[in-house]
Image (tube, rainbow, N blue to C red):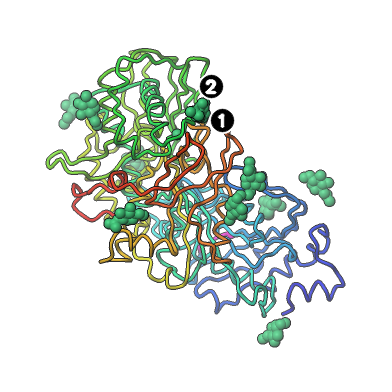
Amino acid sequence: MASIKQLALGLGLFMSSTSASSLATVCNVAYIQSVLPAPSSVDGLILIPNSVTANSVANYSIAASAQSPGKSGLDFCNVTLAYHHAGTKDQVDLWYWLPAPDAFQNRFLATGGGGYAITSGQRGLGTGMVYGAATGTTDGGFGSWNAQLTDVLLKANGTINYELLYAFGYKAIHEMTIIGQQLTKNYYGGNNYTAGGGRLYSYYSGCSEGGREGWSQVQRYGSQFDGVAVGAPAFRQAFLQVMHLFGAAVEAEHEYYPSSCELAKISSDAIKACDELDGKKDGVVSRTDLCRLHFNATSSVGEKYKCGAMGGRPMPPVGPSGGLPGGPPGVPARRGELVCRQFGAPPAPPSQGIVSAKAADVANAFWRGLFDSKTGRQVYISYPPSASFADTATAFDATTDTYGPFLTGMGTTFVNMFLREQAVMAPNTLLGLSSARNLTGDQLTAWILEGLQKYSDSLQTDWPYLGDYHKNGGKILHYHGESDNSIPVGSSVLYHDSVRRTMYPGQSYNESHAALADWYRLFLVPGAGHCSPNPEQANGPFPQTILDSLIAWVEHDENPARLNATVFGTGDLAGQNQTLCSFPLRPLWTNNGTAMDCVYDQTSIDTWLPKLDGFPLPVY
Ligand SMILES: *[C@@H]1O[C@H](CO)[C@@H](O)[C@H](O)[C@H]1NC(C)=O
Ligand SMILES: *[C@@H]1O[C@H](CO)[C@@H](O)[C@H](O)[C@H]1NC(C)=O
Ligand SMILES: *[C@@H]1O[C@H](CO)[C@@H](O)[C@H](O)[C@H]1NC(C)=O
Ligand SMILES: *[C@@H]1O[C@H](CO)[C@@H](O)[C@H](O)[C@H]1NC(C)=O
Ligand SMILES: *[C@@H]1O[C@H](CO)[C@@H](O)[C@H](O)[C@H]1NC(C)=O
Ligand SMILES: *[C@@H]1O[C@H](CO)[C@@H](O)[C@H](O)[C@H]1NC(C)=O
Ligand SMILES: *[C@@H]1O[C@H](CO)[C@@H](O)[C@H](O)[C@H]1NC(C)=O
Ligand SMILES: *[C@@H]1O[C@H](CO)[C@@H](O)[C@H](O)[C@H]1NC(C)=O
Ligand SMILES: *[C@@H]1O[C@H](CO)[C@@H](O)[C@H](O)[C@H]1NC(C)=O
Ligand SMILES: *[C@@H]1O[C@H](CO)[C@@H](O)[C@H](O)[C@H]1NC(C)=O
Ligand SMILES: [Ca+2]
């Protein structure tokens, strides 16, 4: 088999980023078919040659965003193909973008999805074009690039499609990766891949569900990736998804359903009060640990709040948008009004009032986390005070002019569909619960236990032993917005610590952290929300160039003691470069906010690692 360069030379062609026509000579169905992986290299996966499509794309642009520095003038081959599993009639569709040969930098990048989607489509594929990486994504075998796990999880009420569950859990991205790595080598090297000394660097990048998918690979396939950038992972799913109902349980137990506006006032007060605890008055809470230690929502009691109408949107039905957080933000606030945002919550009229003691109790209990009612011991963690309230959304009832319970789409989908195995289309409904007003924290604990047992080897994704990955030299850059209101930042800290304890038993906290930081670093992103900058703390930085840092670590052994980040958005610091501290070190600004240290603060560290002995099993 000729290599792509030999083929191009043989045809008397120059490969260059401006010569789209030469790309076309190797970007066609016949050539792709000729470089498909041999069956022996992908056991049990039967590639379907006549499914191949290919078209060359010239002068493509990836816009700069908080997540990517972007790049223009990109030439690549856009390839799709399908395979099925031996002994079945299933079909899985794959999608790869292969940079023009002169733009290829000996890299492969695997990408994932978000919410219950396993793919981010072209947005994800574009990520790799900036770095000269052949890049891939999979449809998971769900039958369409738009189908999500929630569209296919149930074959019927009471019957889970386990093949697709496990495809989503970890198998599909693994298969897309091993096919993609082999395809990449064949495409650029014929049967003799010599680029980079025969070395193909393999990476993964994803956030949220995409972050969980990255961890699902690192935990199982130790030699598959050289480096991963994993953000705000949606792992520890039994806890994560059930805890999307925690706000509703707190409200039910307090018999108080605040408007989003009342809670938005508390959130805004928390940000103001905690801003300067980090040494820099910039509207960003860089130290949510100090905020947790010093802020009490009772200080907002008696304060006035006022909001315009809330856009919101009806709870997403189970289906294509199945419980994805998102939707239009609230109507832009007018002067003197708070910005009210709710994920997937019903609309609400303009509201104003005075923060009540009950609302403060709800806020404090919500931040404190889930506790067992009998023993008083902690079961799980929650969000820090600076994360705007989302899982506490309430429903406005125009007939009674009052607010009542609202059950989030993520939480109800998990209980109804994943635990009860029933396709419930009615919003705001939890099977087996006569009224949302009866929801309790103990009920959540029971559901978490049930979910843990049922999904521990598919969705939970909290395996803390990473011996193979480490032995193979793999690097991990794990990041999480410190004011994320969809996946609590502490969730990442707990897992990072589980890996530390599991990998380095018997070593001191400092020793084990030093050893871990040789290959796995966790960076909390001040002020950031869920996988993006946060309009409520507009001066917060975001690690736009995290893949540059990952590549520098893997390919040039530059271990990032601090991670580069840039301030996005509309704040007055927009464009400023900052750095992020590697956990457990925490940022502390000095000289009136002009310099930043990364400090060791035991009292702060302790707030991140509460004893979760209210749960009957270890929490990894
Ligand atoms: C490439 O696209 C840019 C706009 O992004 C355009 O200005 C330029 O002319 C294009 N170049 C070619 C060779 O088509
Ligand atoms: C890539 O191919 C797919 C499938 O044929 C097509 O839907 C998509 O628009 C193509 N993308 C580009 C950038 O050409
Ligand atoms: C692969 O290519 C290199 C460099 O072109 C050459 O030295 C080597 O002999 C080739 N190996 C095989 C197995 O063809
Ligand atoms: C908040 O302050 C109130 C009133 O002083 C007190 O009762 C409560 O325990 C405090 N809560 C927290 C979490 O500190
Ligand atoms: C599946 O279960 C839900 C909730 O119990 C019910 O509303 C729906 O009708 C059931 N569907 C079928 C096809 O039985
Ligand atoms: C559940 O809620 C309903 C309506 O609020 C109430 O009538 C009923 O007594 C509650 N049941 C329990 C067990 O709390
Ligand atoms: C751990 O290291 C920090 C500095 O990074 C130091 O302040 C602290 O005292 C050390 N703890 C122990 C127990 O040695
Ligand atoms: C981080 O930022 C510094 C200063 O701008 C720059 O010199 C360095 O190359 C960056 N590192 C990476 C990996 O992008
Ligand atoms: C921020 O860093 C980038 C990349 O290192 C550099 O291009 C840019 O000029 C820097 N911006 C500022 C304001 O220093
Ligand atoms: C501290 O910095 C702020 C701007 O962030 C400035 O307004 C203030 O004057 C500075 N204070 C001193 C003492 O320099
Ligand atoms: Ca600050």
Mark in the foreground, 2 or 1: 1
For the magenta stretch, what is the residue range? 90-94
Quadrant where the N terminus lies? Answer: bottom right
User: For ligand 4, which image quadrant applies?
Assistant: top left
* Secondary structure that dominates the magenta span: strand
Q: Secondary structure at mark 2?
A: loop
Q: Position of residue 264 (x, y in %)?
A: 40, 24
Magenta span contains residue 571: no
348 sits left or right of 83 in the view? left
Q: Which mark is residue 571?
A: 1
- The amino acid type of the residue labelled 1 equals Gly
Q: CA distance from mark 2 to mark 1?
A: 16 Å
Question: Relative to the observer, which residue lies in front, 165 or 9?
Answer: 9
Does residue 578 lie above or below 454 as drawn?
Answer: above
The 10 Å Cα crowd at callout 1, few under 14, some 14 to 19, many 20 or more, is some
**Residue 415, quarter of the rendered image:** top left
Residue wearing tag 2: 332
Residue depicted at x 81% and y 71%: 8
Residue 480 versus residue 583: which sits nearer the camera?
A: 583
Q: Is 469 placed above or below 56 here? A: below
Is residue 93 visible in the rendered structure shown here?
yes
* Residue at mark 2: C-beta within 8 A of ligand 11: no
The type of residue carrying mark 2 is: Pro
